Image: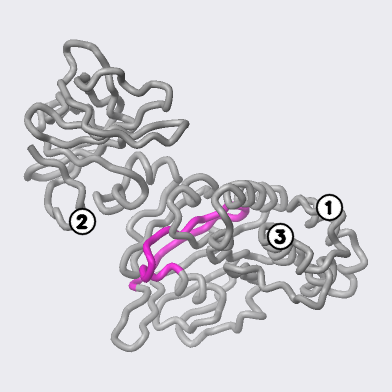
Amino acid sequence: MSHLELHGIAKRYGSVTALDGVDLAVAGGTLLAVLGPSGCGKTTLLRCVAGFERLDAGEVSVDGRAVAGPGLHLPPERRQIVTVPQEGALFPHLSVRRNIEYGLTRAERRTDRVAEVLALVGLTGYGDRMPHHLSGGQQQRVAVARAMAPRPSLILLDEPFSALDAGLRADLRRDVRAALQADHATGILVTHDQSEALSIADQVAVMRDGRVLQCAPAAEVYRKPADPWVAAFVGEALFLPARSTPQTATVSTALGPVQVDTLPPGDGDLVIMARPEQIRVTSAPAAVSATVVGHDFHGHDATLSLRLDDGTQVTARVPGHALPETTVVGLYVEGVCRAYHDHDRAHRPNLVTA
């Protein structure tokens, strides 16, 4: 049995359906990232798990104990679940130590638990400081330490890094992830930041319109997205019309033959999804000819805008030191791509066509 299990949970606000039959399972000691655009239901999901909202349908179980379901709604304080909000919400009149002690029993306060969690979040020696003497990142570290201190069944993180600048955010999320792992804590992180979800979570659940479209390890969500919308949401994606080759795992595209992991069942036109880093730039004569029409330089890498001879527009990602010296280059697709039926153009705004 998983540490947290959600079965068919639903939540409505009048005529608006915020959650529409969500099923999820989170193993103990792991971190699940719930990823989706604004308004998809991810914060409502967190609030329902925490007990701040009553379910309209479905069940929530934590460590085998039902906390919400038909005729059942345990209040937040009885669920052994702690939430870290977007801004740490520390008590401004209490020191760091006393903020962390707030959720501990008297007996626990006499142990070294406060020093232990401060060490886990990289704030050893900060116990006597006041919140206004800390940076924003340090305050968030204290908020995480306070959540971890009583060893709750589940820690919910509601976009806790969103108010920080990019460099600090990357460092903090790595340290928080390491702290949760070291303490064997189970957590759910709500975010709309794709790189954040993919970089620190054991599993990523992608949501849209109150539903979970895919829940899988980060690498699988990125390499084998469940549908074209998920593919485009979790990272840059290039979609190319394709024709299947009988009895092979290769399809024909404007960029030449492309290997796919599986062909979708049934008949219909195909489209393949490739990531920009799979579009290789080469001088080999056998490659498909393309013209470089622009590039965005990012230092460690660069994004090339290219046009094939037939007018197809494609994007390639190359190392920053490997910008092509000529405007005419060769292209080919490296690695295995994902194939879909070409049913819904509306969910693929960046479909390229000849």
Q: Secondary structure at mark 2?
A: helix
The kind of residue tagged 1 is Thr
Q: Of 165 and 249, which appears nearest the observer?
A: 165
Residue at the spot of label 2: 347
Q: Secondary structure at mark 3?
A: loop
Extent of the magenta region? 20-42
Q: Of 7 and 126, which appears nearest the observer?
A: 126
Q: Residue 300 appears at what percent x and percent y?
A: 47, 31
- Spatial CA span between label 1 and label 3: 15 Å
Which residue: 62% across, 65% down? 154
- Spatial CA span between label 2 and label 1: 48 Å
Residue at the spot of label 1: 124
Q: Residue 177 appears at what percent x and percent y?
A: 63, 50
Q: Residue 125 appears at what percent x and percent y?
A: 87, 55
Neighbourhood count class around disc 3 (C-alpha, 10 Å): few under 14, some 14–19, many 20 upward: few
Which residue: 28% across, 22% down? 281
Residue at the spot of label 3: 135
* Marks 1, 3: nearer the viewer: 3
Establish if 223 lies above or below 84.
above
